Image (cartoon, helix red, strand yellow):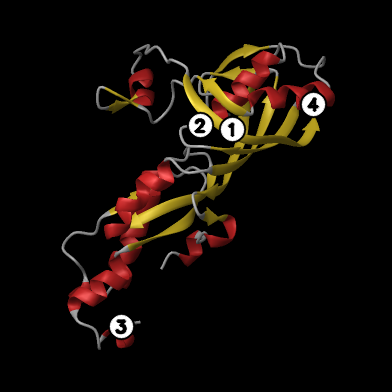
Amino acid sequence: REGALMGLNRREVHRLLTEGYFAVNKPKNWTSVQALEEIKKVLRKDIPTHFQPPVLKLGHGGTLDHTATGVLAVGVGWGCKLLPIFLHGDKKYIAAGRFGIATNTYNETGKITEEMKYDHITEEIFENTLQKYTGKIYQTPPKYSALKYQGRRIGDWTREGMDIEMKPRPVTCYSLKSRKFRLPHFEIEVACGGGFYVRSLVHDIGQALSSCAHVTTLHRTKHGPFMEEDMLEHSQWN
């Protein structure tokens, strides 16, 4: 509080209020950048004017799909220097998917590109297939992604009609298990390394089962050292 800050010099106040790192629960249908902008507004609003630095630097440790929710690591000031650690660090997700429908974004927001039968998929076959995607694997990222090509997001190029060839790249899936299975819906828990796309995983699982699939909901439960119990809900952003 402002009264507690009065005994500190300006530099000490800046360090306490505008430097460090923490985690928030990114709201659904917010981009990661929108979350940062909202946090910046809150900090500007809550920090007394005479203590505010001229530049308030914020960053996040890895993009979450705008429809996804969950743990988003945020750096402020010198905390931004630690963000590459979070970007390449371990993550955990809970994802719900649906068999029988494929979309161009690999999630529920995209246009339907294919519909296939799925009634031949049993829970046993499903769980056995999941094991094929654990360990070090090669994965092709979705064309609607935050990956960069010539300085711009590939997703932006794709929306403008440019067809960029996506090449498989090595990623790591530490564990993958089924949480729910009731055709055509299923739910999985994924622990993975940096650069891993759960949307691509679900898409690939659908193809491996002679069907197709897309993500319906995605929630990140771990991001680097941060767990769900560490993240600040939107109502706590102050």
Give the Cα distance between marks 3 and 2. Answer: 43 Å
Q: Of label 2 and label 1, which has the lower sequence position? A: 1
Q: Which residue is mark 1?
A: 173
**In the rendered view, would you say 178 is above or below 138?**
below
Closer to the chain start, of discs 4 and 3, is 3
Q: Which residue does the numbered mark 3 point to in the structure image? A: 2
- Density class for disc 4 (Cα within 10 Å; few <14, some 14-19, many ≥20) is some
Query: Mark 3 or mark 2, which has the lower sequence index?
Result: 3
Can residue 172 be spotted in the picture? yes
N-term mark: 1 or 4: 1
Residue under pointer 4: 183
**Nearer the camera: disc 1 or disc 3:** 1
Residue 218 image offset from top left, x and y in percent:
59, 39
Quote the CA–CA distance across marks 1 and 3: 46 Å
Amino acid type at circle 3 is Glu
Of 66 and 190, nearer the camera is 190
Camera-nearest label, 3 or 2: 2
Question: Looking at the image, is mark 2 or mark 4 nearer the viewer?
Answer: 2
x and y percent of residue 162 in the render?
Answer: 34, 13
Residue positioned 83% across, 25% down in the render = 124
